[in-house]
Image: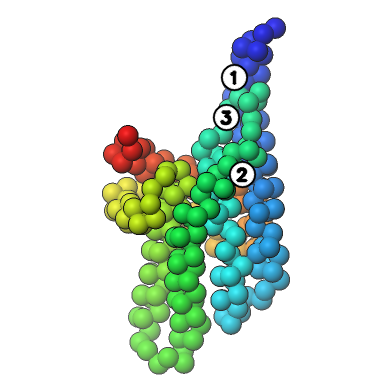
């Protein structure tokens, strides 16, 4: 039996596609945990206290490049059981995307840290209650922008300034994408509050897959309008 026949026998059909997806998710989850280990371990040990907001942001630094690599690997995955290389795709995406992702990830974490510290000390500031609501809205909007920016930076070779502009543009252009990502953000927050940070970490590859699928309309338009 030649290679083409083997590929047809084991690489087609819904069962094969499901098996390849499960395998890819398991490998990417393992690599996500491995690449974020220096931040995840101390993050899990931190108390949910407002004074730990800056430390939590510092622990989240490795998450951006790792999540970017996961998006890249999921985007380039194969449904063929005879041609699965999720680990190679993950590390290729990690190396390729690392500089660009950090250019947007670090400022976003700094921004969230400032918002978090302000909310933590809101009572002492003596400002109107609507200011807290405004800060939450700004933080959520910034997070939805980051979801767009991270996806674009992970899959396309744009300058950081262009990534920032496109992420802002598609917040309005493809309104279904930020809406779907807002639902995903609510789910992630619910898992953290009602279960634990550890459960959220163990679902990292699944959340990355959902983010990628939510972003498909945006990805298609970026390919059509902004790439050759």
Image point (51%, 38%), residue name: 75
Image point (46%, 89%), residue name: 123
Sequence-first tag of 3 and 1: 1
Query: Would you say 76 lies left or right of 173 here?
Result: right
Question: For the residues marked 1 and 2, what is the alpha-carbon distance in whole angstroms?
Answer: 26 Å
Which mark is nearer the camera, 1 or 2?
2
- In the rendered image, the vertical position of residue 137 relative to residue 179, given as above or below: below
* Disc 2, SS: helix
Which residue corresponds to mark 2?
91
Sort mark 1 into few (<14), some (14-19) or many (20+) by Cα contacts within 10 Å.
few
* Disc 3, SS: loop
Q: Of 174 and 59, which appears nearest the observer?
A: 59
Question: For the residues marked 3 and 1, what is the alpha-carbon distance in whole angstroms?
Answer: 11 Å
Which residue corresponds to mark 1?
12
Decide if residue 40 is in sight here: yes
Which residue corresponds to mark 3?
78
Image point (71%, 65%), residue name: 41
Decide if residue 194 is in sight here: no
């Amino acid at each position: 039996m030649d290679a083409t026949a083997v590929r047809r026998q084991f690489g087609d059909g819904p069962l094969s596609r499901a098996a390849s997806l499960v395998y890819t998710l398991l490998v990417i989850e393992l690599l996500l945990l491995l690449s974020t280990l220096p931040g995840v371990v101390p993050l899990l040990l931190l108390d949910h206290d407002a004074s730990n907001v800056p430390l939590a942001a510092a622990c989240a630094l490795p998450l951006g490049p790792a999540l970017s690599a996961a998006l890249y690997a999921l985007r380039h995955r194969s449904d063929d059981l005879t041609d699965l290389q999720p680990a190679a795709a993950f590390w290729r995406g990690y190396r390729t995307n690392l500089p660009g992702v950090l250019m947007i990830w670090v400022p976003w974490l700094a921004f969230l840290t400032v918002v978090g510290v302000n909310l933590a000390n809101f009572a002492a500031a003596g400002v109107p209650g609507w200011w807290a609501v405004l800060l939450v809205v700004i933080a959520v909007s910034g997070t939805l922008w980051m979801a767009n920016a991270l996806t674009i930076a992970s899959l396309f070779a744009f300058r950081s300034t262009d990534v920032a502009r496109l992420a802002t543009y598609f917040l309005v252009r493809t309104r279904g994408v930020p809406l779907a990502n807002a639902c995903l953000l609510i789910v992630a927050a619910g898992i953290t509050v009602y279960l634990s940070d550890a459960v959220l970490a163990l679902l990292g590859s699944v959340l990355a897959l959902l983010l990628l699928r939510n972003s498909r309309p945006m990805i298609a338009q970026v390919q059509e309008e902004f790439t050759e």
